[in-house]
Image: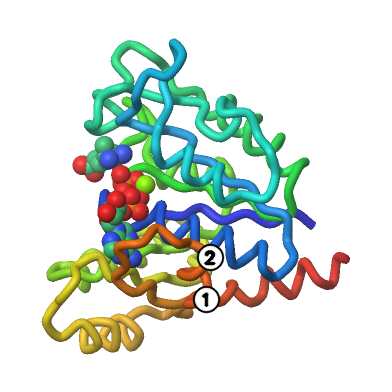
């Protein structure tokens, strides 16, 4: 049985990539082979004539299987703006993303797919994160960057995922503000308000040590059990 998750978040720049990298490390520590995708990336640098995105590179570094850059990030756009603008005249073909995802599934037991922005952020002029997650048919993980305003964003995101007909398998908190007043109270509110399991809270950290951060996470349960049964 092949397992995948679509990683979304309460906003852009709130810790999706860090949480995904830590989760990749967590899966590896539990003995699973893992790959990751950033199917659509806006904000890329040119490297050897090709556009490359830092999120995609970070995910590749933390995955356990090798994958060509184009499989991890089939759509790389230069400008760090919403993908529906950054794509210019390029068409984002969900079928191309699906083929890359399926190839990664051949190579790894677990594939984590990081969205762009939040659940309803566009990925192109015609596709948004919700639509892509539906096409891939994946359960969703929600990353909540703990800052003022995130309680509303988190509840709205969970509601929107349910309305999209997809299952949310859990949420991960990320401490993106070094000294947020009442941090613990905000996490406690989310734990009570969100009807899905908390997989862990990543503490504020200046070091990009994803192995260390992975200790704060636990794996989503029922899919985990399925995989063991399959083995
Ligand atoms: N645990 C943490 N401690 C301190 N800073 C963090 C932490 N997690 C993330 N950050 C900071 O927040 C920034 C944004 O995090 P990240 O790149 O994971 O966000 P994102 O949601 O993936 O953004 P995007 O929408 O661009 O994909 C990071 O570059 C880092 O500076
Ligand atoms: C450029 C940035 N870092 C992201 N990759 C793209 C975020 C798109 C957000 C669009 C929106 O919801 O307003
Ligand atoms: Mg990211």
Q: Is mark 2 within 8 Å of ligand 1?
A: no
Residue 121 located left or right of residue 36: left
Q: Quadrant of the N terminus?
A: bottom right
Q: Quadrant of the C terminus?
A: bottom right
Residue 160 or residue 64, whichever sits in front: 64
- Kindly give the residue lying farthest to the front in the view shown: 207
Quadrant of the rendered image containing residue 221: bottom right
Query: What residue is drawn where x is 73% and y is 61%?
Result: 32
Q: What is the secondary structure assignment of the residue under circle 2?
A: helix
Dots 1, 2 in contact, CB < 8 A? yes
The picture places residue 152, in percent across and down from the top left corner, at 19, 69
Query: What residue is drawn where x is 54% and y is 41%?
Result: 37
Residue 127 located left or right of residue 21: left
Quadrant of the rendered image containing residue 54: top left
Q: Does residue 231 appear in the picture of this structure?
A: yes
Q: Residues within 10 Å of mark 1 (few under 14, many from 20)?
A: some
Instruction: Determine the quadrant in which ligand 2 lies.
Output: top left
Residue 212 located left or right of residue 219: left
The picture places residue 81, in percent across and down from the top left corner, at 22, 31
Q: Residues within 10 Å of mark 2 (few under 14, many from 20)?
A: some
Q: How many marks?
A: 2
Q: What is the secondary structure assignment of the residue under circle 1?
A: loop
In the rendered image, the vertical position of residue 108 relative to residue 168, given as above or below: above
In the rendered image, the vertical position of residue 181 relative to residue 172, given as above or below: below
Name the residue that disc number 1 marks: 215
Name the residue that disc number 2 marks: 211
Which disc is residue 19 wearing?
none
Query: What residue is drawn where x is 86% and y is 65%?
Result: 230
Q: How is the image coloured?
A: rainbow
The picture places residue 202, in percent across and down from the top left corner, at 38, 72
C-alpha gap between disc 1 and disc 2: 7 Å
């Amino acid at each position: 049985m092949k397992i995948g998750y679509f990683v979304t978040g309460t906003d852009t720049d709130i810790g999706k990539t860090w949480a995904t990298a830590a989760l990749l490390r967590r899966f590896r520590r539990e003995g699973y082979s893992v790959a990751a995708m950033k199917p659509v990336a806006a904000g890329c640098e040119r490297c050897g004539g090709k556009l490359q995105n830092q999120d995609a590179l970070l995910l590749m570094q933390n995955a356990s299987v090798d994958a060509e850059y184009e499989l991890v990030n089939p759509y790389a756009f230069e400008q760090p703006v919403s993908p529906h603008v950054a794509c210019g005249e390029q068409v984002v073909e969900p079928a191309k993303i699906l083929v890359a995802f399926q190839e990664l599934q051949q190579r790894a037991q677990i594939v984590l797919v990081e969205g762009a922005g939040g659940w309803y952020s566009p990925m192109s002029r015609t596709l948004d994160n919700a639509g892509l997650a539906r096409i891939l048919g994946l359960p969703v993980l929600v990353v909540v960057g703990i800052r003022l305003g995130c309680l509303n964003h988190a509840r709205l995101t969970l509601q929107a995922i349910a309305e999209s007909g997809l299952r949310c398998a859990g949420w991960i908190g990320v401490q993106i503000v070094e000294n947020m007043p009442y941090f613990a109270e905000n996490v406690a509110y989310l734990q009570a308000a969100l009807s899905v399991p908390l997989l862990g809270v990543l503490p504020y950290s200046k070091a990009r040590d994803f192995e260390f951060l992975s200790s704060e996470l636990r794996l989503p349960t029922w899919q985990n059990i399925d995989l063991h049964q399959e083995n």
